[in-house]
Image (cartoon, rainbow, N blue to C red):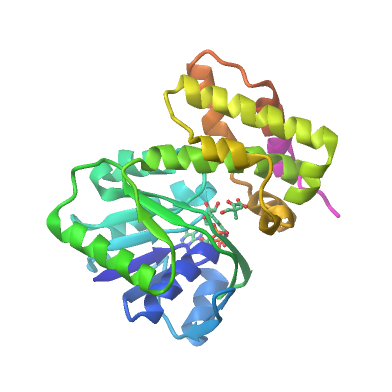
Amino acid sequence: MKIAVLGAGAIGCYFGGVLAREKVDVTFIAKGRTLERLRDHELIIKSINGDFTLPVKVSDAEQLNADINYDFILLAIKSTALECVIPELQKLTGPRTKIICLLNGIGNEERLAEQFGEDHVIGGSAFISIIREAPGVVNHVGDGKLIIGHWQTGTSDAASEEGLAYLIGVFRKCGLEIELSEHIQQIKWEKLLWNITYNPLTALTRTRVGEALADPDLYQLLKQISTEFLTVAERAGIHIGDQYKKELLKPDEKIQNHKTSMLQDLENGCEMELDAILGFVIKTAKSLGLQLKTIETIYHLLRFTDHHPLNV
Ligand SMILES: NC(=O)C1=CN([C@@H]2O[C@H](COP(=O)(O)OP(=O)(O)OC[C@H]3O[C@@H](n4cnc5c(N)ncnc54)[C@H](OP(=O)(O)O)[C@@H]3O)[C@@H](O)[C@H]2O)C=CC1
Ligand SMILES: CC(C)(CO)C(=O)C(=O)O
């Protein structure tokens, strides 16, 4: 079984590294400093479950060989880079390749399905926390479940099913919690409930999750954002589990000090994932005749911030 990891950052290096350690044939598709680093040095994974390092196979994203037939592609770029990697995916995807999309937000799997066909797409939600400390060096700081599921149920052939079962088995053997769901679209919305509530507001106000929750003004806004999002989900016919709603505004100790990925992107001068986290919801709301006052305001403020980085 051959796996390509497209996006050798935090998520790609961690999940790809775990598989490579178990002798799965994994190739990291990388560019720039990550490509240089991984060619000459071992991949370094720091993890709450135990650190490890290992040499890995790496290919230049700009010089891909279209002859290799990968069984699975672990897609772990930021959603902002999705259009840029479509030509790379075209070279990596053969008739039986499945793209496992690990990106946050909504709209990514839909775009992949439009380009490659629904039966080539496996949706994913990673409830995990990993920080890229340097090219080829990642730190797994928060544990959580990885949920994946066929974008179009009932279309997979026996060989792909066998491959997927093997992959899931390897992850489980390594102590990773992974689930194959038949409701991946719902799961993506459930994860988005958390991301849309916390990521944009904490980025805008440069706060950690616990700080935002403890501040009465920000708490009020967190509530408004989640209420607006839940209204859209309900009107769109998406069921959000009660447990996600109940726990949303009282996350446990472990997440209090968390800096959301959107705040990290802002601080690192990287483009924020605004469309996958906010834009898609705004569009869906518009198509349903709903106006989202708080979400739209925050989206526009962050778009402005994205285009006018602060010089601090
Ligand atoms: N980190 C986390 O804890 C979690 C992240 N996620 C989601 O997972 C996704 C990935 O996040 P994360 O791993 O943190 O992001 P990173 O920024 O750490 O990694 C993205 C990687 O994609 C690479 N990349 C960008 N463009 C290309 C290209 N054209 N060809 C090849 N590689 C490319 C980048 O390379 P370069 O640096 O050279 O540009 C980088 O290595 C996001 O959607 C995020 O929201 C979900 C749950 C948790
Ligand atoms: C909280 C976390 C790390 C969960 O996966 C996340 O999705 C984010 O910060 O954007």
Q: Is residue 64 visible?
A: no
Q: Residue furthest top?
A: 289
> Can the viewer see residue 26 in this picture?
yes
Answer above or below: position of 166 versus 180: below
Residue 161 among those drawn in magenta: no
Question: Magenta residues, as a range?
Answer: 300-312
Residue 47 vertical position relative to residue 312 in the rendered view, above or below: below
Q: Tell me the quadrant of the picture where the N terminus can be found.
A: bottom left
Image location (x, y in percent) of residue 293: 68, 21
Q: Is residue 183 left or right of residue 36?
A: left
**Residue located at (83% from left, 33% from top):** 217
Q: Is residue 271 above or below residue 217?
A: below
**Looking at the picture, how far across and down is residue 278, in whole percent?**
59, 35
For image coordinates 15% across by 60% down, the residue present is 159
| Quadrant assignment for the C terminus | bottom right
- Residue 291: where, in percent of width, then height? 61, 17
Dominant SS type (magenta): helix
Taking the image as shown, residue 234 lies to the left or right of residue 258, namely left
Q: Work out whether 265 lies above or below 303.
A: below
**Horizontal and vertical percent position of residue 109:** 39, 43
| Quarter holding residue 195 | top right
Location of residue 25 by image quarter: bottom left
Front-most of residues 134 and 307: 134
